[in-house]
Every structure is written in C-alpha cells, then in structure tokens.
Image: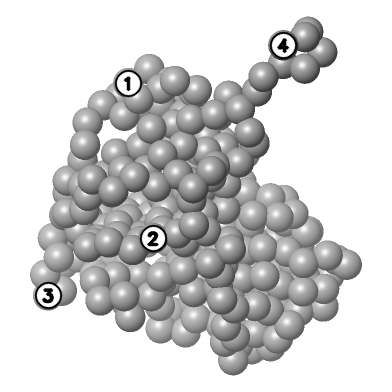
Amino acid sequence: MNAQTPQLPPPQVSTHRGGFGPGHYTIAPENHFGSRLPEFADTVVKKLTTPRNGSSRVAMYLLEIAPGGGTVTPAGAGFEHFLYALDAGLDGVLGDAAPATAFAYLPAGQTFEVANPTDGTLRLLWVKRRYEPAAGHPAPDVVRGVASELERSPGSVPGVYRLELLPSLHPSFDFAMSILSFDPGAVFPKVEIHDEEHVLYMLEGRGVYVLDQQYYEVQQDDFIYMAPYCPQYYYPGGLGTSAYLLYKDANRDGFEN
Ligand code: UGY
Ligand code: MN
C-alpha cells in the first residue's frame, strides 16, 4: 500500500438488498416501487409501511415531490401527522423554503399542504396514524422545529446519542420521534424486545441491524419496520457517524380502548 492510496472501506454496504422476516422488514432504495395518492400531484409516494403489513398502526411515506408538485388539496384529514424534510426548499406546512431536517407534528384534525417551488425533486417523510386519546389528557398541540438546530443528549452508553423531536414523555402524545446517532465503534447496550413498534429511516452512515437474529447491512436512505416484540440490535459501522429517525408508539398499552 503506498501513502497516496489508503485502504478505506467501500462507501456502501455489500450485501444489503432488503428483506422480510417474522416481525420485521427492511427496504432499500433499490426495492422501492412508486405509488400515487390523490391529494398530491407530481409526487411519487413510496409507501414504506402501512397497516396493510398486518401489525402496523402507523404509515410512513416517502414523498418525492417533483418541481411544481405537491398537494392539490389539503392532505391527511382525520389523522395525526409527523412531517420531516429530507431536503431543503419546500413551501407549506414546514414554513417557506424550509431547511432540511425541518419537522412538524400536527394533531388529529389538522391537514397540511406542501409545494415544491424549486427546480429539483424534494423528499419529505410523512408519518400518519390515528390518534389514540388518553382519558384526562388533552390532545397535543402542534410542534415545529429544525432537528439540525437542536442539541442531542448522551444516551445510555458512550458514543450513542438521542434527540427527542417531540415532548413524548407527556401522556397526551401517543408516539415519539427521535434521532439516534452513533459514533464509530459505539455499541448498543442490549438486544431490545419491547411492546412498542418501530418505523426507522436511516438518515446518515451505515451499520448492521440485527432483527430477530437476521443480519441486515443498512445505510443512508434504508427503511426498517419492527413489529411489537421484534428482537432488535444495531451495530454502527463505517468511519463516520450513523444516525436514524425512529418512530415508536408511546404512553399506550396496545389496547385500542
Ligand atoms: O427507544 C428504542 O426503543 C430504541 N433504543 N430502539 C432502537 O433503536 N431499535
Ligand atoms: Mn427499540
């Protein structure tokens, strides 16, 4: 090896092509198949999960909004929503010319509009679910923010950090949205098995996700669904930070009423 050609790991994972097992699945961009929804024009909808998968109480859509595209009528009536900009430049619900990582929580009953005034395709993540009220607690208010402007907190082990995007310790909220980030070499403290389901979108970097003893190489823009009680463990990999956006239902016990 000479000094000009350091041996670095390849910038992408080697085997990952999506997969499906009991209680989980992963979807890589090369698995995507575009759909459309009537509230949107010039927008390809990648339905990463919906209740059609059998256990999910939530949907996550990746919206790819072409120049001039967006909502043609207010979207999402009857549901609560979380929206997260993967790219900068959208007008509408996240503010005009919203920066990447801008997000909004909209309580049930609110709809939203979005438009792409730029000359490139812009991506928006949309989490949608039916709000589950809790007796004695009012429905949450709107929450807005820009994740890149917020301070992450150290997690339970060195090199693991957590940024909570919603005040989801409050019992009014029935879900949490967090960004978990990992220094190279950090480890998860344990294999988790828990009642809550997860929807996960890789924001940065790469690693290996262990789901019910199956190993999946994952990297930026991959998606994972984890059903309740799916055993889960993450090995961060690569030379840089890896991070994912994580949905988790919260403050409820799985009985709908
Ligand atoms: O909060 C969580 O359940 C989180 N630690 N799970 C995960 O990242 N798979
Ligand atoms: Mn978990």
Relative to residue 72, is residue 110 depicted above or below? above
Q: Looking at the picture, how far across and down is residue 12, in whole percent?
A: 60, 41
Q: Quadrant of residue 115?
A: bottom right
Amino acid carrying label 3: it is Asn
Q: State if disc 1 and disc 4 touch (CB < 8 Å).
A: no
Q: Is mark 4 within 8 Å of ligand 1?
A: no
Q: Residue at x 82, y 73 (%)?
A: 67
Residue designated by label 3: 257
Q: Quadrant of the C terminus?
A: bottom left
Q: Residue at x 62, y 49 (%)?
A: 101
Q: Nearer the viewer, mark 2 or mark 3?
A: 2
Q: Earlier in the sequence, mark 4 or mark 1?
A: 4
Q: Quadrant of residue 73?
A: bottom right
Left or right of 165? Residue 188 is: left
Residue designated by label 1: 157
Q: Is mark 2 within 8 Å of ligand 1?
A: no
Q: Earlier in the sequence, mark 3 or mark 1?
A: 1
Residue lying at the far right of the rendered structure: 119
Amino acid carrying label 4: it is Met
